[in-house]
Image (cartoon, helix red, strand yellow):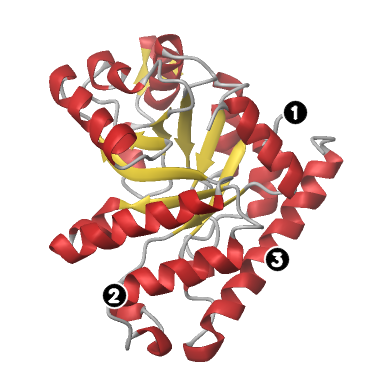
Amino acid sequence: MTRDELIRVIRRKRSLLCVGLDTEPHLVPAPFLEESSPVRAFNQAIIEATHDLAVAYKLNLAFYEAQGEAGWLDLVSTISYIKEKGDCLIIADAKRGDIGNTARKYAEAFFDTLGCDAVTLAPYMGHDSVTPFLGRPGKWAVVLGVTSNEGAMDFQFLPVDGGQYRLFEKVMLRVAEWGSVDDTMFVVGATRPEVLAQARAVAPHHFFLVPGVGAQGGDMQAVMEKGLTADGGLLINSSRGILYAGKDGDAVPAARRAAMELQRSMEAALRVKQVI
């Protein structure tokens, strides 16, 4: 999905919603446990209930890899089901980062074999770990910028260049030189709105994938206030807040209600910003 296509989907759906399909087998609602592949069946039900409200889906690879072959088949099937809907960005949340030759194979795996539109990357190893993912029309490198976890304070806020920048700012500035706004996004956590504003100052035109809203305590209104651009510029992820919004027979209806509540808040902010 190209940048122009993504912007059109955001405007048509009046949404910035990214649904995180971080599905855990032991949390799959009871009605799906009788299926031959409970995770797959639950994912498909969530997609069916939310695809008109979402502009993206994010699949955290760890939740599928942990289940071995069955998990991988669930991943492949879920990606295929999203692609059938035709208008949602598919993000492989893999946080890969390795030397050039290995990075190239990762790019082939996620873009060519799995057919994902985007993959999250850890940039610690530098340009040769990121550039193999760039320059592919409609494909995106989603590079870790500043994250929402407690451990972010260990390295990401260290002063560099004599205190002119913090490390996350330097990383974002340097990564922005390797690609463009058409093939590079940044992961920017939702739990520190003032930091999101600082990240936006560093990368005013890039799309941000924003985790941390909902279960992690991020304030969506603050995220939109600090991060929205004239094109939208945000993919705001909710995983547990949608997947596990309800129980048993109400699980899927509750997921839709939770997604709709987020979408309506996003629509209001998009109208204020005159994105739509």
Q: Residues within 10 Å of mark 3 (few under 14, many from 20)?
A: few
Q: Secondary structure at mark 3?
A: helix
Relative depth, front residue between 234 and 202:
234
Quarter of the view holding residue 78: bottom left
Look at discs 2 and 3 and give the one toward the viewer.
Answer: 2
Quickly name the residue at label 3.
Answer: 261
Quickly name the residue at label 1.
Answer: 230
In x, y percent, where is residue 183?
47, 22
Quickly name the residue at label 2.
Answer: 37
Does residue 35 lie above or below 109 as drawn?
Answer: below
In x, y percent, where is residue 98?
17, 27
Residue sitting at x 45%, y 44%: 90
Answer whether labels 2 and 3 touch (C-beta < 8 Å).
no
Q: As shown in the figure, which amino acid type bears the numbered disc 1? A: Ala
Quarter of the view holding residue 254: bottom right
* Distance in Å between CA atoms under marks 2 and 3: 29 Å
Relative depth, front residue between 261 and 68:
68
Residue sitting at x 56%, y 31%: 207
Residue sitting at x 75%, y 56%: 265
Q: Earlier in the sequence, mark 1 or mark 2?
A: 2
